[in-house]
Structures are given as structure tokens and as C-alpha cells.
Image: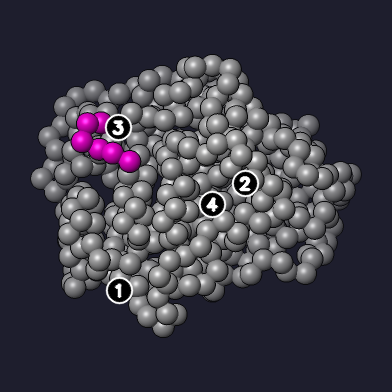
């Protein structure tokens, strides 16, 4: 766990804008023309897309793992030289030195156990967003990556686009003036998955192609239900991180990086009624961030879900000031103007004066390197081969994830939480501890 001295040093680096490239070093990189030997944990859904993208970049696929043997066999038919497994622990142990890097694309609750194991073995790691299920796991992922000196990247893919990096440069140029207020919203969950519901009734036989115990992994045990695998797990408290975990690592990314935010001092969540099974139908979460050097304190407000059928939870009209918005985006309010990011990934922006008129954006001279072909995968692969760290490396991505997930801590506690980032501790209630660091089911470790 980081102590206060580590926290202050890291905060100073963040305030100086050095957190992107200054915190990690890489061991034994391959030459740029050498191919990486990559193993994949999760090969369906987003995992299938990650597999196709890394393989399409010309890297070697040496290991495939999935608890669903139909998905596993499908991937195996496309990559016949790769060895197949249903348990990532066995894959990492048996392939060992054959692997250079690992891609983790499981449900949220299994990201950290698989990722930390891979990094402890010295493997470079690409992990889907949100990086982890809970705050402690995010801190552990960051610390492990730094200790093992491996190349890392989180899968919030907008980070690699030129548009996102131009937006970060614009914010950091001072074009908006003092930004003291940010609003971020999403159209999730909506039609994407269910929230605000109890445990489904009925008993279902586990299909022969699903290794259910491995799917449950470190989470509390429960019977198989088709409403959980393969997709709708996101809304369930034991397995997913809700709309906040799913989308804030995308939509909060631009203001978080652009404003050089670190740990919040307090987080307050209001929501529809929360049960013991799923995230609520809607939530509004307010993060308070302290001043950073010459940058003022900032309030960031997150909105998700539906207040009632047909009515999305969005910033109030008094905030929007006549701005016509899409169903997902972010709005930064500065003393010199407003920046509206009109998509999930922060890759497109519109500038408005404070009297509501749209104005041309004069982007400053680039200060951030551009990702090869605007690809998050190539940004990471380049880092694995000795290039600069990916912009979404874990030193940054774990900090973003930890901050995001504090919203779920406030949601679960049911009150404002006051946070000491250096000690990774909620200081005003002991009830938050189980939500900062969860207990793993017997047989599973971090």
C-alpha cells in the first residue's frame, strides 16, 4: 500500500503533468521487428475483438483461455497453433516462459486476479476497462506493474485517438481558463442491461460448454443463470461495476487527464433504491477534487440511468444553458468558455463562449505523442517492444479507475465518503472498508 510520502510524490508528478510517461520503466523489451508471444484470457465478446486486433497487428497468438468452450473452440479454429485452456491459472503456469504478454478481457470481477498473476510472472499486460472491480485491486495493479517493470495499457480505446489527445492539449493550454466544474453523463444502462432488480428466480442447469465455477472465480458462489453469462453481468453487484464502471473510464477520461486530476477528497452518491443484487436504476455521483498547483479545486458530477421510463438522468438545464447534447458526453465549464465532448471517448469537442455561442477551436501545438494509427493496441505493443509507455498505462489508468470506483463505494455505503488517497482510506466511516477491498472466495488470490 502506498504511504503518504509516496502519495505526495505522485501528486507532485501529476501536477507537473509527468504521470503519463514518468512512472514506469520496461524490462527486457523485444526489438521493434520481433513478434510478441501473446496469451489471451477471455476470447468472446470484447475479448474476441482484442484477440483479432492484436493478432491483426502481426503478433503471435500462443495461448487462449475461456470458460466457455464454444467460444474457446471458435477462437482455436482461427488460431490453430495456440494452446487452449479454460483456467487462466493453468495457462500461465504451463506456458510460462513461452509468453511475453497477456490480454485480459474477462468480466470485471476477474480482471485483477488474472492481471496481477500475469504481471508477477513478468508479462506485459493489456486489460479491459474498468481496470479492476474494486479500489484495492486498482492500487495493487499499479504497484505490481511498477515493481515488475512491465508495459501496460487499459482498454479505454479513445485514449489513442488524435482527437482525444488534441482535447487534452487544449484543456492544458489554459484555453478554458479556470475549470471548476465538470459534468459527465452516459446512456447506460438503459437498454444495455438490467439494474434495480433482485436475484432471478428459478434453477437452471449449467450448459456443458460453460465452466461455471471458473466464471464465478473470486466472487461469492451462486448457481448458474443465463442472465449472467455471457453479457448481462455488468449490472450485478458481485460481478460488474455498473454503468459507472463500464463507461466512466471512457467519458471521464478527457477531463480527468486534461485537468490533471488525482484522488478526490470526497465523493457523494445519490440514487434510486439500491438492493443487495444489482446497481440502482439511476445514480448521480459528485466528486470533489482539491486544487493542484495553479489549478483550482474541481467538482465533477456523474449521471447515469433512467429517472423514469423515457427520462434519462442528465445534467440540469441550469448547467446546460441551452446546449443541445447527445445521450453520452462531458461538459467542462471554465472561466473563459465551455468544452463539450460529444461522444463516449472524448475524441471530438465543441467550444462555446460562456454566453452560449459556439466558437472555433484553435488547438495548441501538440505536446503529446500520437499513437500509431490511433490504435490503443499498437500504443501498448510499441511499449512492449521498448517504446514509450502507452498513454493509458497503469500508472495513469489505475488512478483513473480507483477514482471512478470510489463512486460505487459511496453508493454502497449510502452516504458521502471522505477519502485519504495516500492511505487508501475512507476517513469518516468504517462501513466503506468491505467496498474498498473485497474478500475473495476460497481458492482465489490476488
- In the picture, measured across the screen, residue 217 lies left or right of residue 26, that is left
Residue 431, x across and y down, in percent: 47, 17
Q: Residues within 10 Å of mark 2 (few under 14, many from 20)?
A: some
Residue 217, x across and y down, in percent: 25, 39
Circle nearer the N terminus (1, 3): 1
Element type at mark 3:
loop
Quote the CA–CA distance across marks 2 and 3. Answer: 29 Å
Residue 60 tag number: 1
Residue 166 position (above or below residue 385) = above
Q: Which residues are magenta?
A: 441-446
Visible residue check, residue 169? yes
Q: Residue at x 39, y 61 (%)?
A: 124
Q: Nearer the viewer, mark 2 or mark 3?
A: 2
Q: Are marks 1 and 2 in contact (CB under 8 Å)?
A: no
Residue denoted by label 4:
395
Q: Foreground: 20 or 350?
A: 20
Q: Residue at x 83, y 55 (%)?
A: 175
Residue denoted by label 2:
10
Q: Quadrant of residue 297?
A: top right
Residue 410 position (above or below residue 400) = above
Q: Residue at x 48, y 53 (%)?
A: 146
Q: Are marks 2 and 3 in contact (CB under 8 Å)?
A: no
Q: Nearer the viewer, mark 4 or mark 2?
A: 2
Q: Residue at x 60, y 28 (%)?
A: 419
Quote the CA–CA distance across marks 4 and 2. Answer: 10 Å
Quote the CA–CA distance across marks 1 and 4. Answer: 27 Å
Q: Quadrant of residue 170?
A: bottom right
Residue denoted by label 3:
440
Amino acid at each position: 500500500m502506498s504511504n503518504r510520502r509516496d502519495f505526495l510524490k505522485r501528486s507532485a508528478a501529476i501536477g507537473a503533468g509527468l504521470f503519463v510517461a514518468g512512472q514506469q520503466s520496461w524490462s527486457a523489451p523485444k526489438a521493434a521487428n520481433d513478434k510478441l508471444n501473446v496469451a489471451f484470457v477471455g476470447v468472446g465478446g470484447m475479448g474476441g475483438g482484442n484477440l483479432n486486433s492484436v493478432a491483426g497487428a502481426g503478433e503471435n497468438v500462443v495461448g487462449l483461455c475461456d470458460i466457455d468452450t464454444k467460444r474457446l473452440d471458435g477462437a482455436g479454429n482461427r488460431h490453430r497453433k495456440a494452446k487452449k485452456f479454460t483456467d487462466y491459472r493453468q495457462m500461465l503456469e504451463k506456458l510460462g516462459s513461452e509468453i511475453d504478454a497477456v490480454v485480459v478481457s474477462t468480466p470485471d470481477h476477474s480482471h485483477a486476479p488474472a492481471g496481477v498473476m500475469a504481471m508477477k510472472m513478468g508479462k506485459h499486460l493489456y486489460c479491459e476497462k474498468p481496470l479492476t472491480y474494486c479500489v484495492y485491486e486498482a492500487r495493487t495493479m499499479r504497484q505490481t506493474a511498477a515493481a515488475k517493470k512491465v508495459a501496460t495499457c487499459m482498454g479505454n480505446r479513445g485514449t489513442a485517438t488524435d482527437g482525444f489527445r488534441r482535447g487534452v492539449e487544449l484543456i492544458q493550454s489554459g484555453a478554458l481558463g479556470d475549470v471548476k466544474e465538470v459534468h459527465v453523463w452516459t446512456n447506460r444502462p438503459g437498454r444495455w442491461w438490467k439494474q434495480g432488480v433482485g436475484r432471478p428466480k428459478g434453477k437452471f442447469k449449467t450448459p456443458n460448454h460453460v465452466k461455471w465455477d471458473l466464471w464465478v472465480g473470486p466472487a461469492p458462489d451462486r448457481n448458474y443463470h443465463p442472465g449472467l453469462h455471457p453479457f448481462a453481468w455488468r449490472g450485478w453487484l458481485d460481478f460488474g461495476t455498473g454503468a459507472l464502471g463500464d463507461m466512466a473510464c471512457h467519458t471521464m477520461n478527457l477531463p480527468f487527464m486534461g485537468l490533471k486530476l488525482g484522488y478526490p477528497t470526497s465523493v457523494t452518491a445519490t440514487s434510486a433504491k439500491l438492493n443487495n443484487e444489482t446497481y440502482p436504476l439511476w445514480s448521480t455521483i459528485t466528486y470533489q477534487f482539491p486544487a493542484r498547483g495553479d489549478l483550482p479545486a474541481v467538482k465533477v458530477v456523474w449521471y447515469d440511468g433512467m429517472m423514469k421510463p423515457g427520462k434519462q438522468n442528465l445534467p440540469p438545464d441550469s448547467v446546460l444553458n441551452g446546449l443541445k447534447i447527445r445521450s453520452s458526453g462531458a461538459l467542462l465549464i471554465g472561466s473563459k468558455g465551455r468544452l463539450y465532448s460529444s461522444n463516449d471517448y472524448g475524441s471530438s469537442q465543441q467550444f462555446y463562449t460562456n454566453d452560449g455561442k459556439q466558437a472555433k477551436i484553435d488547438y495548441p501545438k501538440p505536446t503529446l505523442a500520437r499513437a500509431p494509427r490511433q490504435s490503443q493496441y499498437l500504443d501498448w505493443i510499441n511499449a512492449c517492444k521498448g517504446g514509450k509507455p502507452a498513454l493509458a498505462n497503469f500508472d495513469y489508468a489505475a488512478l483513473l479507475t480507483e477514482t471512478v470506483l470510489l463512486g460505487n463505494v459511496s453508493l454502497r455505503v449510502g452516504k458521502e465518503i471522505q477519502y485519504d488517497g495516500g492511505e487508501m482510506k475512507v476517513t469518516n466511516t468504517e462501513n466503506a472498508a468491505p467496498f474498498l477491498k473485497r474478500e475473495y472466495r476460497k481458492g482465489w488470490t490476488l
